[in-house]
Image (spheres, rainbow, N blue to C red):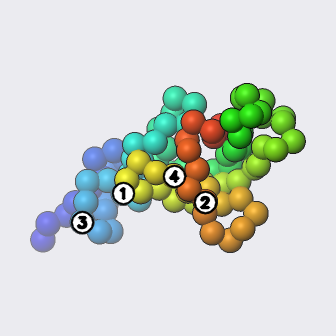
Amino acid sequence: MLVEICKECKKLLATHGDTCEFCVKSGVMIEGKEVTGEDIGSPVTYIPNHADGDASHPDCERGHISSFRDGNIWVRYKSATGALTPPENLVWG
Ligand SMILES: [Zn+2]
């Protein structure tokens, strides 16, 4: 029987692939750190362009990373579903 392990963390894989769900890479960078499966649920803050990088601007919105696919990232804010968000407008925390 073929046993596959995650090439990043060396854990056994439940499904066929190179990496487990935690190590899978998104191709999306937030503040220079690539988002991986481990970051799903992590808190981020959306900073609109007019806030000019000021994370304390009243129009900033806090949310959590909900998913990523094909170099795009979705963030769940107050609504139940994730919103496609440009990663350059996001900071961690
Ligand atoms: Zn892994």
The picture places residue 80, in percent across and down from the top left corner, at 68, 71
Q: Nearer the viewer, residue 34 or 83?
A: 83
Three-letter code, disc 2: Ala
Q: Tell me the number on the disc at residue 16.
A: 3
The residue at 31%/60% (across/down) is: 12
- Ligand 1 within 8 angstroms of badge 1 C-beta: yes
- Outermost residue on the left side: it is 1
Answer with mark 3 or mark 2, whichever residue precedes in sequence. 3
The residue at 71%/39% (across/down) is: 47
Q: Which residue is mark 4?
A: 73
Please name which of the two marks, 1 or 4, marks the residue nearer to the observer: 4
Q: Which residue is mark 1?
A: 20
Three-letter code, disc 1: Cys
The picture places residue 43, in percent across and down from the top left corner, at 68, 49
Q: Nearer the viewer, residue 56 or 12?
A: 56
Q: Is residue 40 visible?
A: no
Q: Tell me the number on the disc at residue 83.
A: 2
State the CA–CA distance, disc 2 to disc 4. Answer: 8 Å
Q: Is residue 31 visible?
A: yes
Q: Is residue 41 above or below residue 71?
A: below
Q: Residues within 10 Å of mark 4 (few under 14, many from 20)?
A: many
